[in-house]
Image: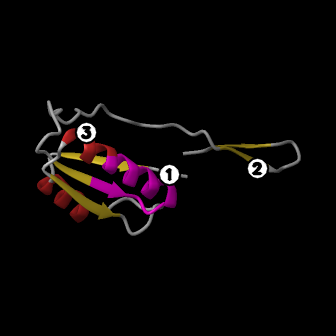
């Protein structure tokens, strides 16, 4: 939450830094190879993310021989992916690639 203070003139100034509360999260297990793996690709709907992901998929298909490439897209880059979409991605893939491209 931003910190608020008042100037002698009565104007209110907000410090946008605020505070961040976070807890430790265990990382997902890593796969030893992408060969034969089901690879999920989540596009956040920004143009440059899509370009980066297309190139990454091309390199991955040429070098790693994944079993499947499953593509997904968020409706809007400014919103979190719906829980149902994340659950579907987790169920249908061994690994996931995503990108943010501004």
Q: Which residues are magenta?
A: 41-58
Q: Which mark is residue 89?
A: none
Residue 34 is covered by the magenta coloring: no
Local secondary structure at mark 1: loop
Mark 1, residue position: 101
Q: Is residue 87 left or right of residue 78?
A: left
Q: Earlier in the sequence, mark 2 or mark 3?
A: 2
Mark 3, residue position: 63
Where in the figure is residue 78, as x and y percent of width and height? 48, 61
- Pick the front one: 91 or 9: 91
Q: Is residue 50 above or below residue 28?
A: below
Find residue 2 and report its image quarter: top right
Local secondary structure at mark 2: strand
Where in the figure is residue 55, as x and y percent of width and height? 39, 50
Determine whether label 1 and label 2 are within 8 Å by CB. no
User: Between tags 1 and 3, which lies in front?
Assistant: 3
Q: Earlier in the sequence, mark 1 or mark 2?
A: 2
Q: Residue furthest bottom?
A: 75
Binning the other alpha carbons within 10 Å of mark 2 as few (below 14), some (14 to 19) or many (20 upward) gives: few
Mark 2, residue position: 12
Local secondary structure at mark 3: helix
Q: Is residue 54 left or right of residue 5?
A: left
Where in the figure is residue 68, as x and y percent of width and height? 16, 54
- State the separation of the CA atoms marked 2 and 3: 57 Å
């Amino acid at each position: 939450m931003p910190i608020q203070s008042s100037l002698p003139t009565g104007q209110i100034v907000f410090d946008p830094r605020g505070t961040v509360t976070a807890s430790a999260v265990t990382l997902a297990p890593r796969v030893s190879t992408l060969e034969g793996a089901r690879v999920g690709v989540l596009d956040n709907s920004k143009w440059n993310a899509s370009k980066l992901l297309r190139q990454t998929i091309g390199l991955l298909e040429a070098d790693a021989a994944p079993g499947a490439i499953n593509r997904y897209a968020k409706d809007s880059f400014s919103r979190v992916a719906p829980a149902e979409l994340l659950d579907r991605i987790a169920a249908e893939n061994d690994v996931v690639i995503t990108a943010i491209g501004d």
